[in-house]
Amino acid sequence: MPRTTTPPPRTTTAVPPTVTGMPWEELVTSALLGTDRRPPEGGGGPVGLLDAAALHTVRRRAGLLPAAAAARPRPAPVDPRPPLPPAARRRLAQLLTDRSASGGSGGRRGTAPDLMELIPQWLATANRHGYGAPPALLPPLLDAARSRTDLRPQALAFAGPRGLWLAGLNPEWKFALRGSPGGSSLPDVTDPEAVTRLWQEGLFAERVALLGAVRSHDPAEALALLGTTWTTERAEDRLMFLDSLRTGLSAVDEPFLEQALSDRSRNVRSTAAELLSALPDSAFAGRMAARAMSCVSPDLTDDAASVAVEAPHECDAAMERDGVVAVPPSGRGERSWWLGQLVEAAPLATWTARFGGRTAQEVVALPVADGWAEELHAAWCRAAVRQRDPEWARALLGSPSVPPSHGPGTASLAERSKLLAVLPPSEQGAWVAGFIAAHGLSEAFQLLGVCPTPWAEPLGRSVVDALDIARDAGSYPWSFSGVMGLAERCLNPAEADRLEILTTTPDEPEDASPGANGYWSEAFRRLVSTLRLRATMDVELIPG
């Protein structure tokens, strides 16, 4: 017969009545401070405190009354868009399921594609085909958009009316209602009473979205709405509202922006000046052009054409009122600082007339006297970006084969990428391909991020060739991981077969980094597998 043992009786601690009668807040205070420093009334020590908390919890729960039944949510709206093909639906479920596992630990990624990085492309393709999101996948889709703001525009477009309906039932997805034309946060812009109510009572994000919606319907009405509360808004809010006027900026905005030049916030004044300078026919642009021309002119003292520069000697009150910042950053001279701001804000057409009808390329090529070339060209670069002028952007970028330090514009790759973004998409890839062919990939990362995707020839071929050259040269492979990541997302999937030969692991040169070729081989295998997966995803999304 097996022997049985009887467990010893459980020792219990009697909780003093005074402790059990203590308010919950007093118990919390004793727990936070410690029973040594704040002993509970009636004693009992730590064990008595915990027992009293347990009794309190049971009492609180037992004393809860049933809540009144809430109104049933309205039925989900009908989504008229066609459903996903079955294979595409399964693919989306896979992408969203693996989302939390993406990102890695910072080590080697292996050869498997990074599925999280493929979600934006999948969503863009699905939206181009006009598909509706599967209802069962709306929660993980909204979770993905909540954690990654870059996914939100495409994800919310794909989620459609049912996604907005579902977001209204979960506070964690409230972001979807802010700024969504179909969201419950935005009223019908033709209902003045509802618009006024939300403008006066809504959250800041809702008000920004409302201003954009009204502006797309009637720009003048949006300005009138903004004017009703402008003087009472916080400076940081005025700045954000003003920044929202960039979309659809036109001559209608000029009177309001002129008033904003007198704002008590320097940042608001600077933004108003920047927006006015993007209106070449504005009175502000005329004032800045007159000031800039007084500083920059043809040099008449030499037989050959050149540019003479006489920087401002002071920053007067009128200049400050027009957004010129008087105090330069540390390390900058006052006069060059003022000059740059004047030239940046002047319409670029000013210089064509100022220099006898010369083209932008001819003006940029003129020698500049007294060492002012770098300052002048940098200001012209900022003006080309601000005014979205492709002719001047093209002239300031110059030939892609010329080293950045010797180019006509600026050596800064960040500034050059901004100029590149002004060019038509058809020109961007060709220019960067020429840059890579001449200078390699080490300085091309920022430029590649501007080019439209998938990369067309010759850009795609130039990137692959440069990666192959870097591998054969025994280059340190991890320094190209950023470009490899871009290639996985941006190369044309048709390049996969041509890349297959690069997945082998050749012998390493003696001067190569240890294990470099193994890394290169692994990276190329991942690139090939990602491109093939992207091709499969595109096929899966083709309507049947």
Image (tube, helix red, strand yellow):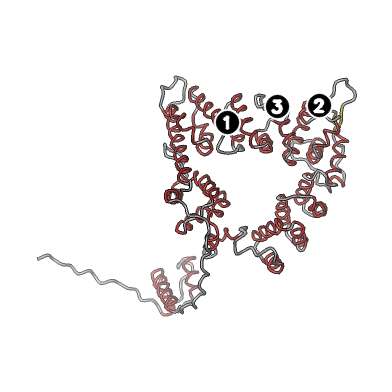
* Amino acid type, mark 1: Leu
Quadrant location of residue 232?
bottom right
Tell me where residue 408 appears, x and y as whole percent.
Answer: 73, 28
Pick whichever, 220 or 468, lies toward us.
220
Q: Is 144 on the left or on the right of 16, as rendered?
A: right
| In the image, farthest residue toward the right | 301
Labels in figure, total: 3
Q: Earlier in the sequence, mark 2 or mark 1?
A: 2
Q: Say if mark 3 contacts mark 2, CB within 8 Å.
A: no
Compared to 9, does 440 lie above or below? above
Q: Is 126 on the left or on the right of 185, as rendered?
A: left
What residue did someone put label 1 on?
459
Quadrant location of residue 352?
top right
Number of other residues with Cα within 10 Å of mark 1, as a class: few under 14, some 14 to 19, many 20 or more: many
Q: Earlier in the sequence, mark 3 or mark 2?
A: 2
Q: Nearer the viewer, mark 1 or mark 3?
A: 1
Tell me where residue 440 appears, x and y as whole percent.
Answer: 58, 26
Q: Is 383 on the left or on the right of 539, as rendered?
A: right
Q: Secondary structure at mark 1?
A: helix
What residue did someone put label 2 on?
368
* Amino acid type, mark 3: Gly
Number of other residues with Cα within 10 Å of mark 3, as a class: few under 14, some 14 to 19, many 20 or more: some
Say which quadrant the N terminus sits in: bottom left
* Amino acid type, mark 2: Val
What residue did someone put label 3 on?
407
Q: Secondary structure at mark 2?
A: loop
Q: Which residue appears at 80% of the width and 50% of the height?
A: 251
Q: Nearer the viewer, mark 2 or mark 1?
A: 1
Q: Say if mark 2 contacts mark 1, CB within 8 Å.
A: no
